[in-house]
Image (cartoon, rainbow, N blue to C red):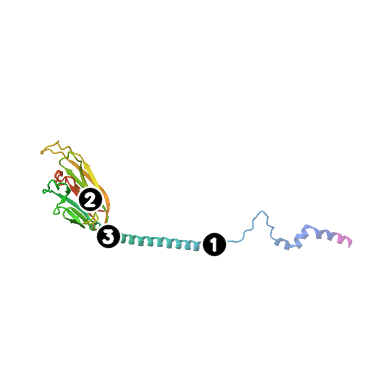
Amino acid sequence: MGRHRDQASPDSTSPLHHDQHSPDLDLVPPRLSRSDPVLAPAPLGSRGHGVSLRILVGVVSLHVFLSVGGFIFLCLQDRKLSMQLPSSEKQETTNQQHNKAFARMVVEETRTWNQESIQGYLQWDLNHSVRRSISYYRNSWLTILQPGDYHVYSRVTFLKGDFERPLVSRVLLRKNETGEETVVMQAYCNLDRSIGSASIPRLCTATQGEVIPLGRGNQLSVWVLDLSLVNYEEGATAFGLYKL
């Protein structure tokens, strides 16, 4: 019996005996290596992320659409208003331009002077002159009806010279018919009286222009030192003004 126990003891510890009597060891899965990463399943998470991204893109797109649409709407409204306003403003500007005061006076030859009244105011041919919102007084003075800034001009051409005095023309201003006269412009030219003939006269022109503020009722006239020396041909001597 002692031999039998000695024989059985080695058999119980042999590998063959372990394989035959421990079949459960084959069911243990192999141990994972540390170098292999453990990944969590992500199909569900990726699907949720895609839905959130689509919602975000939709919200942003809607915001952009509303912003662009609102901008276009405001631009169209502004354009509509801008197309209406200039029309009325243009009409108002056109009416103002049509109603602006002006005068373009044609000189009328004075044939009734004498030595005592040789100097004086130029007379204007009212039948050939053009006026708008400008009145006149005794064919010599222009009366302002619309107050404002006016460009006033004068052109006086002389046929002959004067031995003693320079040829001068002056634009006079007075506040009303009885007001004191003041010189607002004056111009000179020089002409040798001894040179020239009836067929080829020598001429000189005194021209002047200025912007003058004028009030309602103010009057303007052109004064010369010697009416007999003025050239009364059409276009040679003129006077006018227009409101700015």
For residue 151, above or below residue 4: above
Q: Residues within 10 Å of mark 1 (few under 14, many from 20)?
A: few
The reply to whether residue 204 is in sight is yes
Q: Residues within 10 Å of mark 2 (few under 14, many from 20)?
A: some
Furthest-right residue in view? 2
Q: Based on the displayed image, in which of its 4 quarters is residue 167 positioned?
A: top left
Chain part drawn in magenta: 1-6
Instruction: Confirm whether residue 244 shows in the render.
Output: no
Three-letter residue code for mark 2: Leu
Point out the tag, 2 or 3, that comes first from the N-terminus: 3
The residue wearing badge 1 is 49
- Foreground: disc 1 or disc 2: 2
* First of labels 1, 2 by sequence position: 1
Q: Nearer the viewer, residue 55 or 32?
A: 55
How many marks on residues? 3
Magenta span contains residue 2: yes
Q: Which residue is mark 2?
A: 172
Q: Amino acid at mark 3?
A: Glu
Considering every residue shown, the one lying at the far front of the view is: 116
| Residue drawn where x is 28% and y is 61% of the image | 88
In front of the other: label 2 or label 3? Answer: 2
Quarter-of-image position of residue 19: bottom right
To which residue does mark 3 refer?
92
Secondary element under disc 3, as helix, strand or loop, is: helix
Q: Amino acid at mark 1?
A: His
Give the x, y percent position of residue 110.
Answer: 12, 49
Mark 1: which secondary structure? helix
Q: State how far apart marks 1 and 2 are (Cα).
A: 92 Å
Vertical arrangement, residue 216 with respect to residue 238, above or below: below
